[in-house]
Amino acid sequence: MSNTMADDGTRKFKRVLLKLSGEALREIGSQDNISPPIVENIASQIKAAHQSGLEIAVVVGGGNFWRGISASNRGMERATADYMGMLATVMNSLALQSMLEAMDVPTRVQSAIKMDNVAEPFIRRKAMRHLELGRVVIFAAGTGNPFYSTDTPAALRASEISADVVLKATKVDGIYDSDPNKNPNAVRFDHITYQECLSMKLGVMDATAFSLCAENNMPIVVFSMNEPDTIRRALVGETIGTIVTA
């Protein structure tokens, strides 16, 4: 993994993995699961970063369609509910791919669940070759296994493709010492370590994903996607949000 910090203090990335929630594709208050204008905005920011020569992989959640754990809590068998959630991530991945390719950005969707008519199977070496050739790669269907949130495939795929960082887009502009929605005096960190996140129980990612990042020394940048142009800024390495390192 390359050094993520340049001499001037900015973050310098060659290959990144962007983690988006499924809810990010839905307009607040709308009955539609996917908002084309929102997907277009996200795609345009990815395109702008891609044009700089950055190699970009993406993992999109499926929560705008389905949440396996919520369905499980309402009585559905958990594994089945999670498989349904994986299918939701494929729909979101195809929506993002369609918008990117409409903008002339070459894109491939790789699915952890085999569905040859709509996506390639996930093959690590093939994914890395796509990135080297300048294609955006979207990883769909999680890990192909139930009982994991989409944080885990983001951490896993980032490690597998030797990404420089996981960029996690959220509703808040970084990591705080307490919930900023509940505590107006919450303090935001610019930089924090894996150990500090654990000791303070900050819940940056689910436990499996966070452990994967810590064990593989994979930096995590948590930033808000609610402000204009923040996805592009995070992708190209501007100093926004909170970075988690060793």
Image (spheres, helix red, strand yellow):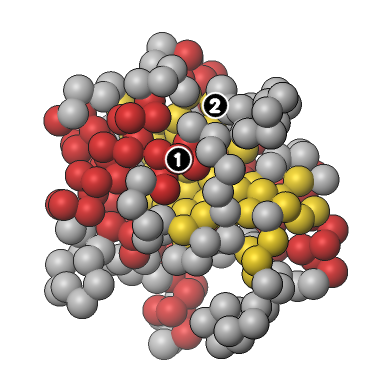
Place residue 11 in its image quadrant: top right
Q: Is residue 137 left or right of residue 193?
A: left
Label 2: how many Cα within 10 Å (few below 14, some 14–19, many 20+): many
Question: Is residue 67 at least partly visible in the picture?
Answer: yes
Instruction: Please give the residue where the numbered disc 2 appears in the rendered image.
Output: 15
- Image location (x, y in percent) of residue 188: 65, 66
SS for callout 2: strand
- Image location (x, y in percent) of residue 103: 18, 29
- Image location (x, y in percent) of residue 54: 46, 23
Residue 150, disc:
none
Q: Label 1 to label 2, Cα distance in Å? A: 15 Å
Q: Amino acid at mark 1?
A: Arg
- Image location (x, y in percent) of residue 2: 70, 23
Q: Does residue 186 sit above or below 130 in this rendering?
A: below
Q: Is residue 79 left or right of residue 119?
A: right
Residue beneath the point at 63% across and 54% down = 242
State the quadrant of the C terminus: top right
Instruction: Please give the residue where the numbered disc 1 appears in the rendered image.
Output: 233
- Answer whether labels 1 and 2 touch (C-beta < 8 Å): no
Q: Is residue 107 left or right of residue 59?
A: left
Residue beneath the point at 49% across and 32% down = 236
Of circles 1 and 2, which is in front?
1
Question: Is residue 22 at least partly visible in the picture?
Answer: no
Q: Does residue 125 sit above or below 156 in this rendering?
A: above
SS for callout 1: helix
State the quadrant of the N terminus: top right
Between disc 1 and disc 2, whose residue precedes?
A: 2
Residue beneath the point at 80% across and 65% down = 198
Q: Does residue 132 sit above or below 209 in this rendering?
A: above
